[in-house]
Image (cartoon, coloured by chain):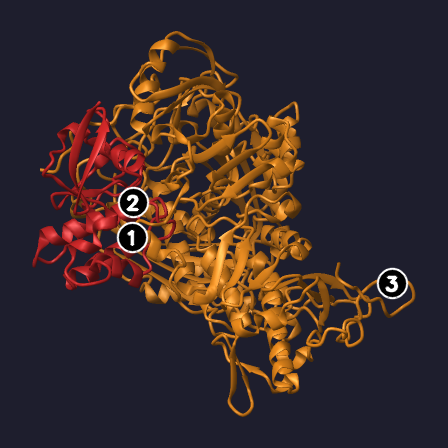
Chain colours: A red, B orange
Amino acid sequence: MSNHSFILNGKKVSVDVEDDVRLLWVLRDVLKVRGPKYGCGINECKACTSHLNGKNFQPCSVSIKYIKPTDHVTTIEGLAATHKGPGLHPVQEAWIKHSVPQCGYCQPGQIMAAAALIHKKGSKKITDDDLDGIRNVCRCNTYPRIREAIKDAAKHM
Amino acid sequence: MPVLSTSGAKGNTYMSPQPQTGATTAEAGTHIASTHEALGSAPRSETNGLSRRRFVGYVMAGTSLIVAGQYVVDPNEAAAARVPGAGLANGNGNGNKYDFAKAATADGASPILSNEQPADNYDFMDFMREQTRAVTPLLTLELTPEGRVHFDMPRCEVGQSVESGTAQIIADQMEIPYDQVDITLSKARVDLMDAQLTGGSSSLYSLWEPLRELSELTRQRLVGAAAKSWNIPEKQVRTKGDGFLYGPKGRKASYGSMASLAASAQDQFVGTLLNAMLGPPKGGVIGKVVPRKDIHAIVTGQKQFAMDLDIPGALPTMMARPPTFNGTVNKVNNMDAIKAMPGVQDVAICKGTHQSTVVAVRANTFGQCIDAVRALQVDWAPGATGQANSDEMLSKIAGVLLPMEPALPGSEVIENTYKFQYRVSGPLEPNSAVADVREDSAQVWAGSKIPGTPLAMIAEELQLPFDKVILNVVYGGGSFGTMLHGDRIMEAVYASKAMGKPVRLMWHRTDQVRFGREHPGSVSHVRATKVGNSITSFTQWHASGCCDFTHSAGDAMTGRMMKKDPSHYWGNTSVTDWFYQIVTSVPYNFGPTRTALTEAFEYDYVPTGPVRNVYSPDVAVARELLVEDMADKFGMDGYAFRRAFAKNPAMVAALDAVAKRGDWGRTMPKGTAQAIAIHGEYKCQLACLMEIDSRPRAVKSKLKQGGIGPRITKAIFAGAMGIPVNPDACKAQFMGGMMDGIAAAFNEANDWQDGLTLQGGWDDYGWTRQWDTPLEWEMIVIDDGSKVPSGTGETGNGAGYAAAAIALQKVLGKKITDLPVYFRQQKFTPIPKVPSIPQSPTRALPI
């Protein structure tokens, strides 16, 4: 058991937990941050997708000991604050506009993956290959609407 | 107790059909004005069978306005006629008026009208409608002085949008904004018997009338209260859909401001609506695209599933499971060492699902549960399932096919047998439940689509009376059949009981694939006979691995009785044979038509259950593939043949719509193809056109460890679905079902070997990803004239699966009889069976 600290959604947090506990459980079980979901724990479904220093990553597959005190972890709860202006993030707005979710279990991860993709592409157009490359599983099969929402959100970012 | 009036013929206790002016006039404002004026009238064909029924209303005691009601049969009405065209209005009948001969013979076909099948006139949705009608007196609708409407809904929201749909139904009839209606998920209620079942695409259909009656009753009470308050006749009070009451001379009052006046200090009967026919929806909210009630919570990560709840003391709990299904614990060899592991609080042997026993670990974090499960050294004993494997199971299933009768001499026989593998239900949220079992009470939080059965099972297991057991129903992260069964609930109860502490139980993904509910494998023998330009008979014998229906319909008795039948077979198969008959219909005029189900294995041989669309996806695929062969014999293409023989005009309209929109019949580049298929069920008639691309560019663009085979590039659905309560939500359900079908046609399957499946994750299982998604997708709504909503949750699966299978058949240039087409063609290293769950990677940092 040792102390680990990092910056979560803009605020410094500190936990006492064993070194090898994966970050997803630190978030969900210790810090009670429940936005990132568990879908497999083996880095396949990407339901837990969050951002580490602005990039997509899967906290289910990272031990807390590899997270540094200066690392910025952003979960779905902190996404809106990363966007200039009040209200929701453009990706969240697009998700509502295009009626994307059904059960909603995968959507925090989908939204984080989409936001990172759009950010990474910058001014370059988002192609079908880009969209095909999003590995996040959706069992309800909302995939077609996710594609529409991402293309729309990109216009506003 | 409500005051009931008796009147009419001697001795009878039925309500008079006249508005009650005498019985309760002591309370001013209880008289209900003429309903004709309030409700308008509706032609009989829209009654949905309610011509002999009246709805009687009550106001329950309270400071808010709380209404209840019930249906009664009116003996004074002339004998209820068979509603003409009922089948047509319901979107499920033969459409006798459609000129089939004229339509068909133009193409050189002479269809012989088929006999109706049971499902054409009465299907599972109608069964649920009846169950819900019967318990309507036990449902209430509340309007608070703050203007909030509350309905405690006896259904589970799992993504299918029933929560939002019921809010729309209420808002439309009550004439209040959608945003003012709050829906909660009802706890398990023993008194609701078989009416607290979410499934069979039946929720909106079964709640349609009761909710509209109760909403109209609420509105009328408010009208009465406003009239009394303004001292004017009721007919001068108007509602306009915005949650306000309007009177002459600019009078205006919010619904909330009238709630207390409309309420009652004691339970009170308030008379009958003239008849239970409310006519078509008012159109203010029904038929509109509105945002899901939970959408803001979803996109901000606030929506709570079972594992997101904070129940005091409930710590993460996972199970170590046997290496073969139904295995049991002989001995745990290192109990003390496990208990000493970091974070571990409790370890206990307890019952698992089906016939197994498992080792439960309760720890501070789920990660530490995984570590402990993996470190456990257990001597396992094999169970009754032994070394079950897919090949043997499919072979035994084929062995229970009914024999096909010989064809009449002079007939040309078109026949084939199709084989389908086992497939998981696999919602993304794995089985999750919180349980707190105490000495004299128990409380559970879990998603559940039939909560009555596990409630009774808990009571029996813990030897507690029903009123000491609370089962709170929570949002589900998808269900697809899994939540019909109480596996998660019972395991959480067993663990909490064994440990004497609250548990927050979650299954690992690998648990979910290997021990979670599956769609059984099946073998379908389909045969048509042809004489001249007619199909002269159609027979489909469908043999399936046993589908576990022991969840029953939810009353406290039936499920437990089914489970206790000593054969573990006959009780279940009596239900499945019935279920098959009230959902299955052949959508063609093929002359004498029959179909039936037979099943192999005990209900708990392997973990099965009614997965989305139950038997119908495989039944539809087998049928539609044989229809392709039939079309060949007629020298017609798939669209022309289906159009000539389809028995429902709404289906013909759907076919025409997809063919037109998809430019059917145009010259397709080599390596691509078009496919068309139809499926009708749950009062939906659906046609699906797909285009497929197997050219190297489409296939090679797939990413590493991506999907296998060609890509469906386009999918167009058209369908009649009665009234789409929210067209967007209906389309979403068809879209989801369509892609279920792509998964099942291409790659999705569990491969049982040596008593457990090889699959254990998402990548090895072959579920859809973005790279499988059609680049063009469209849904066209066909109006079938029905004034009630059809069931949209499942039918898209049958239609999409069939179209995808036909698309593959065309582009691969070979007859397809085994599905999924790419079964056993994906190379992967199976996740080990011991320990039962894999470890998580440690350092998957972004590059």
Q: Is residue B317 above or below residue B769?
A: above
Secondary structure state at the residue bearing disc 3: loop
Secondary structure state at the residue bearing disc 1: loop
Residue B12 marker: 3
B659 left or right of B354 in image: left
Residue that badge 1 annotates? B300
Task: Write down the chain letter for disc 2.
Answer: A
Does any portion of residue B789 appear in the rendered image?
A: yes
Q: Write the residue at 68% across / 57% down.
A: B137
Q: Position of residue B422 (x, y in %)?
A: 43, 32
Q: Is residue B781 above or below residue A135?
A: below
- In depth, the one of B696 and B50 nearer the eye is B50
**Mark 2–mark 1 CB contact (< 8 Å):** yes
Do callouts 1 and 3 point to residues on the same chain? yes
Q: Amino acid at mark 2?
A: Gly
Q: Position of residue B594 (x, y in %)?
A: 61, 46
Residue B145 marker: none
Q: Write the residue at 51% across / 70% down.
A: B172
Residue A35 marker: 2
Task: Write down the chain letter for disc 3.
Answer: B
Q: Nearer the viewer, mark 3 or mark 2?
A: 2
Alpha carbon distance from label 3 to label 2: 59 Å
Q: Residues within 10 Å of mark 2 (few under 14, many from 20)?
A: many
Q: Position of residue B600 (x, y in %)?
A: 56, 28
- In depth, the one of B55 and A150 nearer the eye is B55
Direction right: furthest residue: B10
**Where, quadrant-wise, is the C terminus of chain B in this rendering?**
top left
